Image (spheres, grey):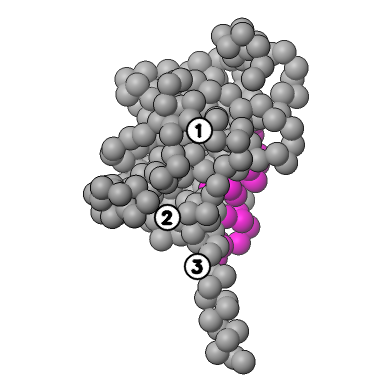
Amino acid sequence: MRELTTISGELRRRADRTRLYRYRPYTKQAEFHAAGAEHRERLFIAGNQLGKTWSGGAEAAIHLTGRYPSWWQGHRWDRPVRGWVGSDGFNAVRDGAQRILIGEPKVESLWGTGMIPGDDLLDWSRAGGGVPDLLDSVVVQHWRNTGNDPDRPRWEKDGVSTLGFKSYDQGRAKWQGDTLDFVWFDEEPEEDIYTEGLTRTNATGGIAWMTFTPLRGMSSVVHGFIEACGGLK
């Protein structure tokens, strides 16, 4: 019985550290990912607890690791990437995007049970500023598929990707200076923060996506997207 318990515990541990491999998007999530192949900017508006942050985190983890699944139709890189994820305050960053990507923030032994596979989470640095258990950045193993069959990948290590955690209330100046491949805005930013984040991807031809419930109504950010696409989709 003890041996069975040990085996069961190990299986759960492995499953917890490989969540990304079992991510299967529902229709709207799949459409959102696929749109990245054509559109540099994307917005996923949905109600609470409907999977928008989960899908945003899955996309970030896929780009950071290079582990593009066979069903993936969105944007691809064939090299390691640099990205940022931001939200409305560092507590929101920690309890939202960081939790989805890394695991439960308050229990370090669970870091590696988020969307970034545990074995691919190579290193992290903690943030200062008085917010407990907040990360400043992480280093992620990047892989390249050298096989010809997308359903049976042959993964080879291909360098490392990095991800930084940002807060909107840091102000626009803290969103300047770096060159990035992607920015994920988890919760709605002010227009100046969004514009500055997007500018970080200009040199690389990178992408930006937002995931939020539109609690501010018809803000300038939301209006810009709705106007560009001719209405909500």
Q: Quadrant of residue 106?
A: bottom right
Q: Quadrant of residue 185?
A: top right
Give the SS element for disc 3.
helix
Identity of the residue drawn at 34% across and 47% down: 150
**In this image, 144 relative to 92: left or right?**
left
Q: Nearer the viewer, mark 2 or mark 1?
A: 1
Identity of the residue drawn at 74% across and 32% down: 47
Identity of the residue drawn at 43% across and 34% down: 73
Q: Position of residue 216 (x, y in %)?
A: 74, 20
Task: Give whichever of discs 2 and 3 has the lower sequence position.
Answer: 3
Tell me the magenta residue range.
86-110
Q: Amino acid at mark 3?
A: Arg
User: How would you rate the neighbour count of disc 3 (Cα within 10 Å): few for under 14, some for 14-19, many for 20 or more?
Assistant: some
The residue that mark 1 highlights is 33
Q: Amino acid at mark 2?
A: Leu
**In this image, 167 relative to 204: left or right?**
right
The residue that mark 3 highlights is 14
- Say above or below: 222 vs 121: above
- Tell me if I can see residue 134 in this picture: no
Q: Position of residue 124 (x, y in %)?
A: 43, 52
Q: Quadrant of the N terminus?
A: bottom right
Q: Nearer the viewer, residue 1 or 64?
A: 1
- Say above or below: 67 vs 9: above
Give the SS element for disc 1.
helix
**In this image, 155 relative to 83: left or right?**
left
Identity of the residue drawn at 55% across and 15% down: 192
- Say above or below: 68 vs 107: above
Residue 121, disc: 2
* Mark pair 2, 3: CA separation: 14 Å
